[in-house]
Amino acid sequence: MIEDRDALARTPAHDLALSCIEAGIEAARPERVVAEQVSVEDDTLRIADARYDLTAYDEIVLLGGGKAADVVARALGDVLDDRIDRGLVVTTDPVETEAVDVVEGSHPVPDEQGREGAREIVDRAREHGESSLVLVAITGGGSALLPLPAGDVRLADLQAITETLVESGAAIEEINAVRKHLSAIKGGGLAEAAAPATVVGLVFSDVVGDDLATIASGPTAPDETTYEDALAVLDHYGVDPPEAVVEHLEAGATGERPETPSGELPHVDNHVLANAWTALSAAEDAVDDTEYEAVVLSSRIRGEASEAALSQVAIAEECRETGHPVEPPAVFLSGGEATVTVLGNGEGGPNLEFALRAGIELPAGVVCASVDTDGSDGATDAAGAIVDGETVNDPMAARRALVENDSLSVLEDADALIETGPTGTNVNDLRVLVVEDG
């Protein structure tokens, strides 16, 4: 899974950190998750703890979007055999599926192919009635991959506001509050289009706390945010949006446009099949047969990546120096979604910034690995990086790189990048700190 793994695993501690990363990503792969949580027996479809009588439906349709939506579609096809009549998903790096059409879109900035794919998904959703079972594969990245501008908003407007918000340091909940109110598919829009069909969301969460309204901007979930909330986000971060965006949001705030659906959607069930804990639990298990003690710090780490790195380095230092919160050797694990406020013109992402900041501060005897489980950190081709106290040989230059948001170049020069290619899953960040004894 990890390219040049042997070179990266230069000590047993490095090897253990990489093993935790591999175990976490592998556990969250849709093929494995779907095989464990979805099954068919005697015309009964089991999804997690729910049961669906397939004899009650004339057709089964699969729709959806996200970085792993195509892999979910293929895995569902394996379980349901020939029961899926047709479908369409939008994703990056498509894989072939049997009965489901796959459209390749762009992430993190939406493109025209994604827009047309989203439009086709909504059109297909509207074709179905009470006798249809509409399965919806929802994974991280769906917000960008399902761009369907509402009203007079253009794709170019969505592209501009998405790029600005991503670079502003805004939390994903805030970014998606804006996107939901500029879209005809997000914020429960797909669920509304598919009514009165039975809609079942199969969700791979890349959001802290697994808020269904935030994951992929909640195409099958009710939305409690408002046009006023979206305008407040733009104001808080000093964003200068395109004129069409302002006009659309202000019209909604004054009641000229309907709000996104809130409250219950009685024809919809959503099931979170995988999340940060899926990866963390597997990473924890990877430590079981070693002398190390595994400690999961949190699945909900968020905020600026550099600040999160300092906090976790401090925990590793405390462990090594005082034996608190546990005696070394120990492995500290965390998940969640760190952010980066972009002020420079370099290349990087939250996990690369986390790793570089950690590398500047790490004491001897501690190894840190940090990756985005989808295999691409920010807009880079690297999943993340692995560092120790010797990785950064010029701390001043590394600090300048952080100011310029150019963590990629420093870590690439240090041969510290973790590269996996597209992993076929997305349950957000996974971080490992290995603290050796003595």
Image (spheres, rainbow, N blue to C red):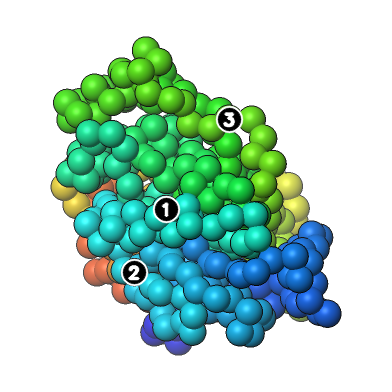
Front in this rendered view, residue 269 or 329: 269
The residue identified by callout 2 is 103
Question: Farthest residue in the top direction?
Answer: 254
The amino acid pointed to by label 1 is Val
Who's the residue at 42% across and 45% down the image?
Answer: 185
Q: Sequence-wise, which precedes: disc 3 or disc 2?
A: 2
Q: Is residue 295 left or right of residue 91?
A: right
Q: Reading the chain from its start, which is encountered first: label 3 or label 1?
A: 1
Q: From the viewer's side, name the closer residue of 148 and 301.
A: 148
Q: What's the mark number on residue 235?
A: none
Disc number for residue 122 = 1
Label 3: element kind: loop
Residue marked by disc 3: 262
Please state which amino acid type lies under the numbered disc 2: Val
- Examine the rendering and report whether any part of residue 222 can be seen: yes
What residue is rendered at 63% in x and 85% in y?
A: 81
What kind of element bears circle 1?
A: helix
Residue type beneath disc 3: Ser
> Left or right: where does residue 240 sit relative to residue 237?
left
Q: Position of residue 170 (x, y in %)?
A: 38, 34
* Side of 181 relative to 292 (left or right): left
- Between 55 and 340, the residue placed more toward the observer is 55
